[in-house]
Image: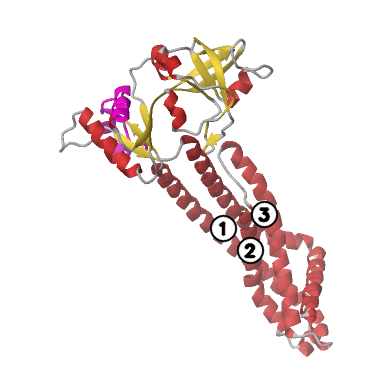
Amino acid sequence: MFRFFYEIWEGLRIALRAIHAHKMRSFLTMLGIVIGIVTVTAMFTVINGLERGFERSMAMLGTNVLYVDKTPWFATPQDWMKFRNRPDIKADLADAIREQARYVEAVAPLVRTGRPVRYRDRALYGVFIQGSTPDITRIEDIDLTEGRWYNDFENRTARNVCIIGAEVAENLFPNERPLGKKIRVGGHRFEVIGVLARQGKFLGLFSFDEQIQMPFNTFKKLFGSRRSITIEVKASSAETLDLAEDEITGILRTVRKVDAMEESNFAINRQEAFRDQIGVIKGTIYAIGIFLTALALVVGGIGVMNIMFVTVKERTKEIGIRKAVGAKRRTILIQFLIEAVIVCVLAGLIGVALSAIVAAIINSFFTAYLSAGTVILAFSICVGVGVVFGLVPAWSAARAHPIEALRYE
């Protein structure tokens, strides 16, 4: 066992000396492997980022939640005209669900728009504005860093109060506390009564921190009610989610007087629709990433094999001398195999370093996460490529006849 580890250590020293002696050649050999590692790690960082961002975003939106909308979330262009002619979803449907449903824990109507927000000489444009009832706190995972949520009285009397997102607070109030301050939302004065905790972006795209929450009736009073709304419904449990969906469907069809033979003129959306879309995106990324990775690694592996054959030829006399003084085939095989693996592992180091930079760039406008598992996978691939493409040259070196090798010029 000691002899085996000594051979590994000796092979490692020889390999590093050989790579150092031919730095440019070794670097050019690594390029294909580097490209392959950057491709595979970039693919997994995007997929990991998507999964982490999706789970975090879904947790913020609440669990066991159904969304009553005018149209399905992912409608085909062919069905769009049919869906747009449906009647709007109104707040009275939320009241009907709340009064009649047995498998429902909470119901909250949602209405949204975008408006500029101002405080003194500072302004933000296109801020996400949402109006709802206090029941929204029973559905979504809402956390405040300071202040409070609006109450039922403020909703019924349509008070001009609001809760602002973390980025809105930072941009409008960089040097003062926002609570109690008066801001203008779409030209209307509002009192800030709360600040939301930082939540990040939804799938790296839409920021939850650039929003303002206000009472539902306040929204209707100031920004109009002639629009379709969304109704969020939280089922009693995960086990009753399907029962709650069937129950809501029956209630809405009855309230809207939809005939038994007619198609429902509303849609009940679930978070699984997003999961399906994420699955499609992940599948596409996997397909493209695996193809490009395989292509780059095969090209890089062939380059490694070619250089190793050249190295074996250049060091044929050295091989002959080592075998003449008693070196075994195994020793020669391990020496050149280690050299091939070291070249690939060094390429992996460069590739992972570049991947960390790529992940940071992607994360600035989308979502990406470089995990320890991805790094381990990258180095495992490097070792595998080194073994597979270095085995044939190493075996040819191990099989060299010592007398013929010593005669080689």
Looking at the picture, tell me which residue is in the foreground, 20 or 94.
94
Q: Say which residue appears at 51% left-offset and 18% top-offset.
A: 162
Q: Is residue 395 magenta?
A: no
Looking at the picture, tell me which residue is in the foreground, 181 or 72.
181
Q: Going by the image, does 255 lie left or right of 219?
A: left
Sequence order check, earlier mark of 3 and 1: 1
Residue 149: x, y in percent? 51, 22
Q: Going by the image, does 201 lie left or right of 152?
A: right
**Residue 28 in view in this figure:** no
The number of callouts visible is: 3
In the rendered structure, which segment of residues is drawn in magenta? Answer: 71-99
Residue 334: x, y in percent? 73, 77
The N terminus lies in which quarter of the figure? bottom right
Amino acid on which disc 1 is placed: Thr
Pair 1/2: label in front: 2
Q: Which mark is residue 351?
A: 3
Q: Which mark is residue 293?
A: 1
**Mark 2, residue position:** 380
Colour style of the rendered protein structure: secondary structure
Q: Quadrant of residue 253?
A: top left
